[in-house]
Image (spheres, helix red, strand yellow):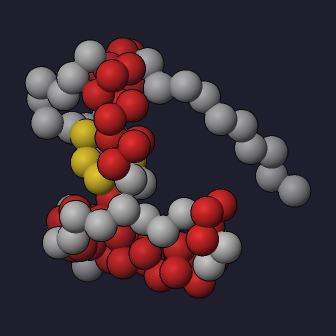
Amino acid sequence: MIPHRAKQITLKDYDEFDYIIGMDEWNIRNLNRILGGDPDGKIYKFLTFAGSDRDIADPWYTGNFDATYNDVVEGCRGLLKFLALI
């Protein structure tokens, strides 16, 4: 099994990365709060890459892991197109 760990985003992360992606509106609000705003336009809601303003379905609340999977696939395809990788 591959070990996983979470880490809180920092201002250093904002300086180091070109894209900071949240899964829902709550994530975006928290990212803006933690980072003190988004002056360089690096914060994105994931499904905006797929042309949607929807939040990723959260299986914690919905219990529907298939919907979450489909949303993540849609977001990944949109991000790859945005980055011109497909």
Residue lying at 25% horizontally and 48% vertically, measured from the top left? 44
Q: Position of residue 86 (x, y in %)?
A: 26, 79
Q: Is any part of residue 49 visible from this angle?
A: no
**Residue 69's image quarter?**
bottom right
Quadrant location of the N terminus? bottom right
**Residue 71's image quarter?**
bottom left
| Relative depth, front residue between 76 and 38 | 38
Residue lying at 62% horizontally and 78% vertically, measured from the top left? 64
Q: Residue furthest front?
A: 61
Q: How many marks?
A: 0
Q: Position of residue 81 (x, y in %)?
A: 21, 73
Left or right, 5 with reference to 46: right
Left or right, 1 with reference to 64: right
Q: Position of residue 48 (x, y in %)?
A: 22, 62
| Relative depth, front residue between 37 and 58 | 58
Above or below: residue 72 compared with residue 38: below
Above or below: residue 1 compared with residue 78: above
Residue lying at 61% horizontally and 63% vertically, measured from the top left? 61
Above or below: residue 81 compared with residue 58: below
Residue lying at 54% horizontally and 63% vertically, measured from the top left? 58
Left or right, 68 with reference to 74: right
Q: Is any part of residue 22 visible from this angle?
A: yes
